[in-house]
Amino acid sequence: MKEIKLFILINLLGYSIANAQDVSAYQAGAYQPGLMNIRDLAVLEGPGLILIDYNYWNNSNSYYDRFGDKVSSYEIDRLLIKTTLDFNPQISGYINVPVLFYASNIKILGGRYMASINPVFVTSNYRMNIHASASDTTVISSGNSGGLGDIAILPVGLGWSVNNKIDLSFFYTFYAPTGRYVTGAADNVGKGYWTHQFQAPAYFYFQEKATALFVMPTFEMNGKIKNSNVRPGNRLTVEYGVSQYLTSWLELEILNGHNWQIGNDKGEDVWWLDTPLYSKDQTSTVSFGAGVWPWEGRFNIRVKYAMDYGTKQRYKSNFWSFSAIFIPNLLNDEKGNK
């Protein structure tokens, strides 16, 4: 986004203004921790089709540097220029992810085979106010973008249940760069590269599955950004949480996640790698959610609030989410499977 490029240019004043047309140094990866519903990746009791609609609203008004300190101003003392730039960023967005998920009776290595397809639709708005103390001048940059983002396809999912007490799964997902992306553009909605994602969720159940303890590592391996020689660094996420059914229809959950860039950005066009302000980014996210079954075993709705903390080298965000799950009793052998 434009305000991110502007922020980078301000912090790297020794570089040519031509860098505004280079690949952005801000690459946050494809997977956001803390936003999923805890039991969404649990092994289903039977085969069938599931329709899910995720809705996310996010807001951010602060950027944190590599030390985890909030950046609200920048001092310039170079040649004849001496001033303080005060920043006031405002970023908001909406993401809709409809999911078509299928669990089969096919067994591979003893695990039930699963697959899904998840298109992503994105809208975003940004506004950056920059005030220069020396001239008492304020510059405002704003804009918006929207459209089809990068589609996520899960071609291989395998799930194993152990004595109705433990669920173990493996998921391979790839993100295809279907979203609009042009280097230097202010209205991109895609990342411009392929991502291969590997997840291994584990569930441990108590009180006849009323209580679920959850832990899941996620590894992201990124390809090159199109029309450039930049490969964003690989990423690791670890999430853990607990889900508790208070009644047969009411569920509460808390989920915590940590996301790290674990590999350096690579390629001849990585102009930011050797700058003194560059470091691998990271963030943590905690979320609180509630779900109800208005139609038992068939229709579920959930709300969630999530907030970032421990953020370094990236924007800190807050999220609200609403999701709806419908089980149409199609492509299954038994009616009413959950």
Image (tube, rainbow, N blue to C red):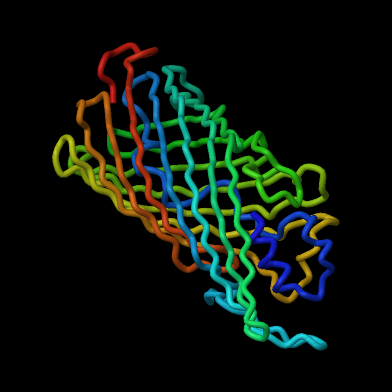
**Count of residue discs:** 0
Q: Split into 4 quadrants, where in the image is the C terminus? A: top left
Q: Identify the residue at horizontal 77%, vertical 75% (top origin).
A: 13
Q: Identify the residue at horizontal 58%, vertical 36% (top origin).
A: 147
In the foreground, 163 or 263: 263
Task: Examine the rendered structure and indicate whether residue 101 appears above or below residue 259.
Answer: above
Q: Position of residue 115 (x, y in %)?
A: 50, 26
Task: Examine the rendered structure and indicate whether residue 240 appears above or below residue 251.
Answer: below
In the foreground, 282 or 142: 142
Task: Examine the rendered structure and indicate whether residue 283 appears above or below residue 200.
Answer: below
Q: Identify the residue at horizontal 44%, vertical 48% (top origin).
A: 216
Q: Position of residue 28 (x, y in %)?
A: 60, 55
Q: Position of residue 314 (x, y in %)?
A: 58, 64
Q: Is residue 224 rendered to the left or right of residue 50?
A: right
Q: Is residue 24 rendered to the left or right of residue 281?
A: right
Task: Examine the rendered structure and indicate whether residue 227 appears above or below residue 67.
Answer: above
Q: Is residue 272 rendered to the left or right of residue 136?
A: right
Res 37 quadrant in image? top left
**For the view shown, which residue lies furthest in the front direction?**
136
Q: Identify the residue at horizontal 64%, vertical 61% (top origin).
A: 4
Q: Split into 4 quadrants, where in the image is the N terminus? A: bottom right
Q: Is residue 280 rendered to the left or right of residue 111?
A: right
In the foreground, 55 or 194: 55
Res 49 quadrant in image? top left
**For the view shown, which residue lies furthest in the left direction?**
247
